[in-house]
Image (tube, grey):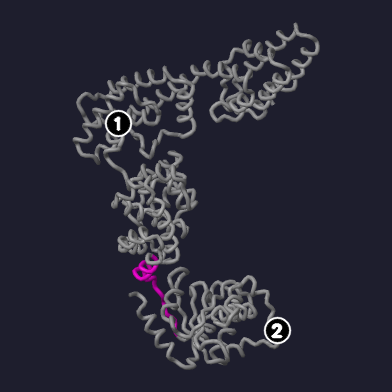
Amino acid sequence: MPNTHVKEYLAHYLTLADPGYGVLLAAPWGAGKTHLVQQVTKNKDALYVSLFGVRNADDIDRAILMAWLEGQDTPGMSQLGKIGGIALKYIKLSAEFSIADLAKKRLPDTLIFDDLERTNMPVKELTGYLNGFLEQEGKRLILLANESELWGEDEHRIKEKLIGHTLSVRPDAPSAVKAFVEAIRNEKAREFLQDNRAGIEKLFIQSGTGNLRVLRQSLMDFAGLHARLLDERFARFTGNETGMRKLLNAFLALSIEFKTGGLERKDFSIGQDPATLFPEKDNPLTNRLKKAEEKYGPDIIKPIPYGLTLEITLAEALICDGWADDDLLEKGLTHSMAFHRLEDEPEWHTVRWASLRDEALVMKAIDRMEEKFAAREYEDPGIILHVFAARLELAEIGMPDFEINRVKKECRAYADEITARATVTAAKAGVDFFHDLAPRRGHLGLRYPHGDSPSAMAFEELFQYLRKSCDQAFVRSLHELCQQLLVLTRTDRDQLNTLLCNNEHYAGKPVLQAMDAAAFAKTLLELENTAFQEVTETLRERYKSPHSELEAEKKWLAKLTGELKTRSSSLPPLRQWQVETAIKRNLKFS
């Protein structure tokens, strides 16, 4: 009961007649000052008034009037009070109206003024106004504020005139958590939170924020998530008590940090880019997560996405946006460490985490990984690299049947075979992996070998080999793509435009080098003029602000232009003129 002294002193103060001084309850925003004073004055004749945003004495008059009206039982008066401050501030008080007269006749003897530090009034003017209730009306004043934001360096004498006693309020986590949980409407969520009250209190203390309002908001948010998980689709998660408890702790920790500024949305983006996930130098995003880990412990937060109990993409949706659709929710929880099951773990993953797994499980995973390796079942380039890394590490620790030079030879053969059969889709996926994600550091939250160990240096060789193989496969796949583009030239020019000008894989890459310029020119000249113009305008758009890599298509474009001129020379004059005009206007680099 951290605030027993506060309650006992306030109980004594409420017995005093015309005390001549006010009492200040001091604590940061959200520490529970308002809740505490409302508990103490419950069933007492007291009026609570928030001074948030008041600018002058007239605003205070209106705030008092609104609070007083809300407490009246007279028909119509309570409804008038519910108009709220926005409307009441426009009510003009007549010259005959005196708030002092109202205070003498109607206002309770105990007045509670909250949010003193959040007014827009000079402290001297504010305290002078409030002091009138003490000296002229003999009222009891209980004032609530974050004292560190209230007084200036030269304003302590002003304080002494108004405040006779200052009481420091400390967050009462046990009482607050009990009250917050009891207020949860969903019965199942309420029961779950009641069963975990001790853990919630511990986590709140670990946060060091002292902000009970943020804790309440976070608990309400989690209760909403829990209610959604009661759907049959998510039964396997709610049925896992340990996982749900881990989810609760991670959710509350991330929510409190986000709401109090310890984490920002961009801290959650590290899950999208291994370059920020595994920085070579200190990274502020990772460092903020490291600070959070220091507060709550590695079982709740780790500064890498894979280590987060709440999977990072889902965490960003739930914490930053307050919502995730059912598909993301299911996928995120499935990949969450809270619900991680060893029996669901991919075999290559188990081998890479061999130091943390039972020997029998690791040996079984090695056998399965080798079977899939021999059958060339791994196609994702990021996972292929993890398999390469696992096999090299097995060689380094001296596992039978794994020798580092032989492993390198086998992995290069794997890269050759898997890329030799690549389709356009598979080839571009490989190129995009290496080009866009800077994956040398890691993939799927797991870091690749690095440093000067034999396995790390061998891995770097294989990394470059697979990268080169993917590039070569992409070039080979372009013949298939170009055949597709020729068909689209005749049948779907909108899709042709999308692929050549807006597609992330093709718009900035010189894929048309592989196109037979003569075949393309022949296809173009077989089109009606309107369609012909559409295609050449697509090429103009493609080269309007060309990516540097598209410079490699200049020779191809010149060859296409030559083919069009030669082939159109035998066409009727009007058609020939249309082709020449299109060439001049559209077929050039800007």
Instruction: Give the structural element (helix, strand or loop) at label 1.
Output: helix
Q: Where is residue 137 shown, x and y percent of the image?
A: 55, 91
Front in this rendered view, residue 233 or 266: 233
Q: In this view, does 100 lie to the left or right of 338?
A: right
The residue to which callout 1 is attached is 390
Front in this rendered view, residue 206 or 520: 520
Residue 123 visible in rendering: no
Label of residue 68 in the image: none
Picture layout, residue 354 above or below residue 64: above
The three-letter amino acid code for the residue at tag 2 is Ser
Q: Where is residue 518 shown, x and y percent of the image?
A: 63, 10
Which image quarter is the C terminus in? top right
Picture layout, residue 492 above or below residue 179: above
Q: Please provide the residue range marked out in magenta.
A: 165-180
The residue to which callout 2 is attached is 94
Measure how far apart labels 1 and 2 are at the Cα level.
83 Å
